[in-house]
Image: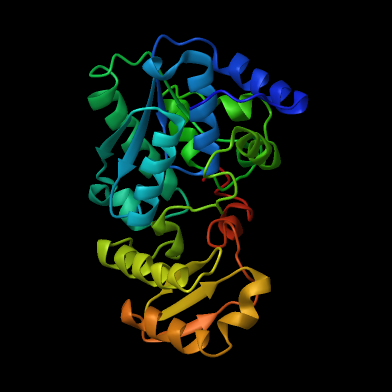
Amino acid sequence: MTAVALPDEVTTLTNRVQRALGAPARLGVAFSGGVDSSVLLALATRSLGPDRTLAILGVSASLAASERRDAHEVAAGIGVPLVELTTHELERPEYVANGPDRCFHCKTELFSLIDDEVASRYRLTAIAYGENADDARRPDRPGARAATNHRVLRPLADAGLGKADVRRVARALGLASADKPAAPCLASRIPHHEPVTAAKLRQVEDAEAALHELGFTDGRVRHHGDVARIELPVDELVRAVTEPTRSALLRGVRAAGFRFVSIDLAGVQSGAFTLPLVTRGGTSDA
């Protein structure tokens, strides 16, 4: 990635992240291609150099094929090698059970495999991931507990960078993911306590691909058995129910295996399934 001159306020942010990161001899970044991990990877590369930085992409049925392709493109643009690691969270009963702590079991699988299969092979001395300061304050991010258990660094959060800060840095660096909407894993579309299966994940992936083909800038398909509940940006709801888009959307989502197709008037909702459970008391660690 070609070094670019940064505005003073962005330089201040990047310096804070680089101080929080320190100077590991070789760093592995748990990488998804989203804006947070992309900024972390880019700043680590600027600080350590591409020879001391490695992107690690966990691949499983919960990662959409489009997200996998995007991750490779972003890492290539930054100029850092990317290795894929096949994860097996669907073999973990706790993950399949899909409680509010599902992400803890998913991240435990990822970080355990990085420790066991990647760290020694690539002589990594530290692992980091892209948690930002806003996410660190949320109660519905149990993956953070897995990161703590595995001594994974979180330089963005430690440097105090929230979502807006991360986007500002991404744009200044010219990252391809700078304006990419948040893309949680496909399992987040399945209501808690409904089992996660490969078949359900494929249905969600195919239905969301239909949204993208129709040009929607963001969108999530929540899996309610025979019913697909579609969340779209509020300013795109009218187009979704206007011909010919309505008919094309109906065909595409039904082709993914859903019998009924509904559109949620509330729009895109982050943490739609988890937040109501972890803010009622009793499960705040999830």
Q: Residue at x 40, y 48 (%)?
A: 70
Q: Is residue 259 left or right of residue 41?
A: left
**Residue found at the very far right of the displayed protein:** 9
Q: Nearer the viewer, residue 12 or 146?
A: 12
- Number of numbered discs visible in the structure rendering: 0
> Where residue 15 sits: x, y (%)?
66, 18
> Residue placed at 58% from the left, 70% from the top?
232
- Where is residue 173? Give x, y as percent: 60, 33
Q: Is residue 146 above or below residue 49?
A: below
Res 267 quadrant in image: bottom right
Position of residue 140 in the picture relative to residue 259 (left or right): right
Left or right for 61, reference 187:
left
What colour scheme governs how the chains and residues are painted in the rendered image of this protein? rainbow
Residue drawn at x 52%, y 66% as measured from the top left: 219
203 up-or-down from 95: above or below: below
Residue 94, above or below 83 = below
Residue 143 at x, y = what percent?
47, 40
Tell me the residue at 37%/16% (across/down). 51
Of the pair 191 and 245, the residue shown nearer to us: 245
Q: Nearer the viewer, residue 88 or 285?
A: 88
Q: Tell me where residue 258 appears, x and y as whole percent.
A: 36, 81
